[in-house]
Image: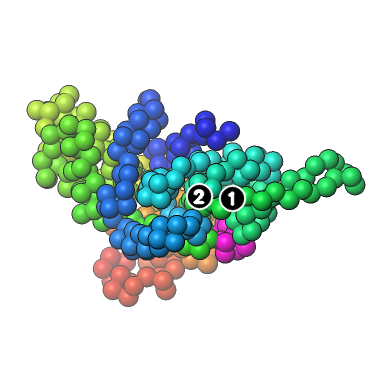
Amino acid sequence: MTDDYDDSSYDATARIVDPGGDTEDRRFEAALRPRKLADFPGQPRVRDQLSLVLEAAKRRAAPPDHVLLSGPPGLGKTSLAMIIAAELEQPIRITSGPAIQHAGDLAAVLSSLAEGEVLFLDEIHRMARPAEEMLYLAMEDFRVDIIVGKGPGATAIPLELPPFTVVGATTRAGLLPAPLRDRFGFTGHLDFYTPEDLAQILTRNATLLGIDATEQGIEEIAGRSRGTPRIANRLLRRVRDYAQVHGSGILDQGAARAALSLFDVDDRGLDRLDRAVLEALCRRFGGGPVGLSTLAVAVGEESDTVETVAEPYLVREGYLVRTPRGRAASPLAWQHLGLTPPVNAVAGAEQLPLEDGGGRFGG
Ligand SMILES: Nc1ncnc2c1ncn2[C@@H]1O[C@H](COP(=O)(O)OP(=O)(O)O)[C@@H](O)[C@H]1O
Ligand SMILES: [Mg+2]
């Protein structure tokens, strides 16, 4: 069950329509993943905190506290889990919440762990309840109760486990039950990357892939990748394709601009889903507020996709506002779409910074 787990089977960031892209992504991701904490650009806070936790554990020659990594897809949670194992010089066992539908699935994994091993639980918020309860006990007391038999004759046989480290990853930390969250001694929240960090990642990867790229070409991609390394890596390959087919083979700013527009990435880096969400909000719902599920239906996506994939970046860049009554478009959203907001627009203006609330749009 753990061996055939596929890291990209639930890849909500796979949004550029790209036949065979899944396999290509997986191949490239494996090749480009940094292997050491020091080679992991960006996320300075998480990196420093994690580095301390790991160093202290190594000095004590004991497994570190369990680690929870949260944040939107494509920011490096899986990469960090692998780095943690590599830094600890321990093997890593990889599985995911959706793969654990019964407590027995988890018991099988737990009972075969070696001392010090890292257990990576991706999408941990999607694990079945009974398994979750088994995990509490395993994380806290390094013990599982194996149930033998059925009905009144069933008995629980406690099984001691060697100490190990759980690394959990989630795009939805808010969905984790408090008792599970509390069992992680360290939580790292990954945030969107700066264009400078992305440029550093892209430069390294262009070299690894043997791509001849100019600084301006790299910067163009870095500034339009939604702060997300996975998207940056994917755009790098599309721009490379474009440069090879239509250009001189050199990845420069012209190739980057042309390829990004071909793939519907706009000048602010928003893609088709981002714009669909903003268009629906402004054109169909007068700027909102509107409930998440209504909005998701309007763009033909799952609520979960809108909430975990599109929304975090739109909120962070100030296009979208979450209000108690639903999602609302900010003045920036109207402006970005080239629309004039209605006079009474921007319900939820109370959440916007004052300088954005003024008469910039003239009614
Ligand atoms: N800080 C980083 N430096 C370099 N590459 C990164 C970084 N973070 C993520 N990546 C790359 O982005 C892709 C997605 O990362 P991944 O760890 O799978 O994200 P997540 O698990 O959060 O969805 C991988 O190809 C990985 O190599
Ligand atoms: Mg992942």
Q: Secondary structure at mark 2?
A: loop
Q: Does mark 1 have its CB less than 8 Å from ligand 2?
A: no
Main SS, magenta residues: helix
Q: Residue at x 69, y 44 (%)?
A: 103
The residue lying toward the viewer, choosing from 359 and 18, is 18
Residue type pointed to by label 2: Gly
User: Mark 1 Cα within 10 Å, few/some/many (few <14, many 20+)?
Assistant: some
Query: Which of the marked residues, 1 or 2, is nearer the chain's N terminus?
Result: 2
Say which residue label 2 marks: 116
Q: Which residue is more in the foreground, 84 or 312?
A: 84
Q: Which structural element holds mark 1?
A: loop
Question: Which range of residues does the magenta coloring cover?
Answer: 174-183
Look at 40% across and 46% down and name the residue there.
Answer: 89
- The reply to whether residue 304 is in sight is no
Residue 52 appears anywhere in the view? yes
Number of disc labels: 2
In the figure, 128 relative to 329: above or below?
above
Query: In the rendered structure, does residue 179 fall within the stretch colored magenta?
Result: yes
Name the residue at 62% across, 50% down. 161
Tell me if label 1 and label 2 are in contact, CB under 8 Å: yes
In this figure, which residue is indicated by the disc labeled 1?
162
Q: Quadrant of ligand 1?
A: top left
Question: Where residue 45 sits: x, y (%)?
Answer: 33, 63
Above or below — where is 304 with respect to 176?
A: above
Q: Which class describes the residues within 10 Å of circle 2: few (<14), some (14-19), or many (20+)?
A: many
Location of residue 243 with respect to 147 vertically, above or below: above
The circle drawn on residue 261 is none
What percent of the width, then of the height, locates residue 272?
36, 42
The kind of residue tagged 1 is Pro
Picture quarter with the C terminus: bottom left
Residue found farthest to the bottom: 354
